[in-house]
Image (cartoon, rainbow, N blue to C red):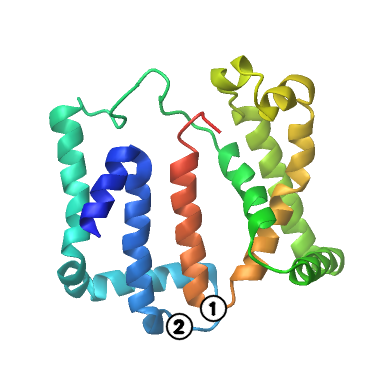
Amino acid sequence: MGIFSLLSVYVRQNNIIWCAFLLVYRIIGKYSVSIGTIRGNVFRSVIGFIKLMFINGKDIIKTNYVQILVFPVFCWYLYKFNNGKLVFGDHLNHQTSFHPTQFLYLLIFIVVNLPITFNDFGYTIKETFARLYFSRHALAAYLFLVSVSIILVDKWTIVHPFILADNRHYIFYIYRYFKWSKYILCLIYPFCLICIIRLIVNSNEKLVKLILWGFSSMLYLMLTPLV
């Protein structure tokens, strides 16, 4: 696993995030009994996992030391041979920038590509609408997420020069002729997030894994201007 992790990082340097994701994911799977199987509070689930990491620290290092060594080796290579820069190749077109809307795009992509039947998909959408209609707390949370989405889209939508310069891709025409559409999508992003949670989370273990995936995805996507 450690060799494959190094190869993946050599191909694309921010794959180091997914190397960390896989390491923690394996730890969650091994100690899933300690995390529990009952749906619970997000904060308690995360705190419980952090405690688990400290309590079983020696065993975790012993069983995953090869995978863990990937990270100091990667940092040493960046410092010694790459002048401390993350990207090995073209630095000009791969500069770090804050682009949170990348994660919002991902939410729609996931909902569209989830491996579920149309009946399950329709039922989840129906249940989500019903909850928003009957629960004031759920509606307030949804409107809050819509507001956050609008702020992120308005302040931090980055259009990479490659998109504006290449008319062979449909994204080029969206950014050129339908700029207003980015605000319409702000109504959809929170709805997609709610659907994903309702479809996936039914235990503390899955909740912690979803939080881990979300955090890793944000690190991977939100620091680059490319779509």
Q: Residue furthest front?
A: 168
Give the left or right position of residue 62, taking residue 1 as reference: left
Q: Residue furthest top?
A: 165
Q: Which mark is residue 143?
A: none
* Helix, strand or loop under label 1: loop
> Can you say which quadrant of the picture contains the C terminus?
top right
Expressed as whole percent of the image width and height from the top left, the position of residue 58 reads 16, 72
Question: Which residue matches tag 2?
Answer: 36
Q: Residue at x 39, y 74 (%)?
A: 48
Q: Residue at x 51, y 55 (%)?
A: 214
Compare residues 223 and 109 and report the one nearer the observer. Answer: 109
Pick whichever of labels 1 and 2 is earlier in the sequence. Answer: 2
Question: Which residue matches tag 1?
Answer: 203
Give the answer, above or below, for where 160 lies relative to 213.
Answer: above
Give the left or right position of residue 95, taking residue 11 as reference: right
Category of crowding for the residue at label 2, using alpha-carbon neighbours closer than 10 angstroms: few (below 14), some (14–19), many (at least 20): some
Give the left or right position of residue 134, taking residue 145 as reference: right
Expressed as whole percent of the image width and height from the top left, the position of residue 116 reads 68, 68
* Helix, strand or loop under label 2: loop
- Do the numbered discs 1 and 2 sit on residues whose CB atoms are within 8 Å? yes
Which amino acid does the dot numbered 2 rest on? Answer: Gly
Q: Quadrant of residue 194?
A: bottom right
C-alpha separation, residue under disc 1 versus residue under disc 2: 7 Å
Give the answer, above or below, for where 200 lies relative to 174.
Answer: below
Which amino acid does the dot numbered 1 rest on? Answer: Ser
Expressed as whole percent of the image width and height from the top left, the position of residue 80 reads 13, 31
> Can you say which quadrant of the picture contains the N terminus?
bottom left
Say how many tags the image has. 2
